[in-house]
Amino acid sequence: MTKVIIVSTSAPQLGDHKTGLWLEECAAPYYKFKEAGYDVEIASPAGGPVPLDSGSLAEMFLTDACKKFLVDPEAMGLLSHTAKVSEVDLAATDAIFFCGGHGTCADFVDDASIKGAIETLYGAGKAVAAVCHGPTCLPQCVKPGTADPLVKGLTITGFTDTEEAAVQLTDKVPFLLETKLKEQGGNFERADDWNVKVCVDGNLITGQNPQSSEGCAEALIKFVSA
């Protein structure tokens, strides 16, 4: 059975801004992976319960997948008892998916266990996917056997600078994701704000925003099935 690890933030705060996981970016991929017959585990940097960004529970963002997830004992059980990323069996993992929320800007940025997981799986040719602020985990990573940024020369996307400005958190994040990925030599592509955009370059799969989480998960499934 194909095993995929969904990685969520453990951080409830970004400075003085209350945040956490953006639920839709976990819920939609979770059900896509379950429908594909995958064994799904949820992990986080600290392990244990994952904080939810209250904004993602607002009615306008509460998608059908979110509503289903919140009343799904198995799904909520996984989210409440996440494994530590450092304890995930990478050899038994076929794909990894990093979901977003501004919490990632606090604990995905410089995390040795996340860096190690990405570099190990990417180097093994396994699928590495990230959506919205999930790609915040990528700038710390390097290409196998080199000192070059992992994203150098790769076509990628993520939460855009204009989307960050729209949610008024430009001054809170450690770096603007679009700017950082471009600085590292990534071929950054984007759709208009809040529109679906998914990039696939080899085994690296990225999505721009919450609207792209389902498409990002589908791209991962397509890669694994190829």
Image: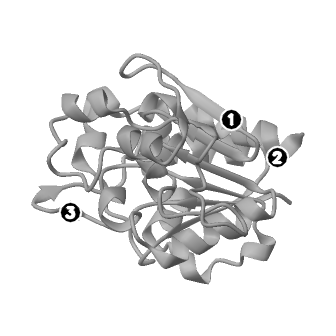
Question: Which kind of residue does numbered mark 1 sit on?
Answer: Val
Q: CA distance from mark 3 to mark 2?
A: 34 Å
Q: Position of residue 83 (x, y in %)?
A: 54, 76
Identify the mark at residue 200; answer none if there is no mark. 1
Furthest-bottom residue in this view: 87
**Identity of the residue drawn at 36% across and 58% down:** 104
At 46% from the left and 19% from the top, the residue drawn is 191
Label 2 vs 1, first from the N-terminus: 1
Residue 16 or residue 81, whichever sits in front: 16
Rounded to the nearest angstrom, the CA distance separating label 2 from label 1 is 12 Å
Residue type of the residue flagged with mark 2: Val
Counting other residues with Cα less than 10 Å from the Cα at mark 2, is it few (<14), some (14-19), or many (20 or more)? some
What residue does disc 3 label?
A: 13
Residue visible at 52% across and 26% down in the picture = 189
Contact between marks 3 and 1 (CB within 8 A): the answer is: no
User: Where, by quadrant of the figure, is residue 39 drawn?
Assistant: bottom right
As drawn, 87 above or below 191 = below
Q: Are marks 3 and 2 in contact (CB under 8 Å)?
A: no
Q: In the displayed image of the protein, which residue is found farthest to the right? A: 226
User: Residue under circle 2?
Assistant: 224
Image: 40 above or below 171:
below
Q: Earlier in the sequence, mark 3 or mark 1?
A: 3
Q: Position of residue 152 (x, y in %)?
A: 59, 47
Q: Quadrant of the C terminus?
A: top right
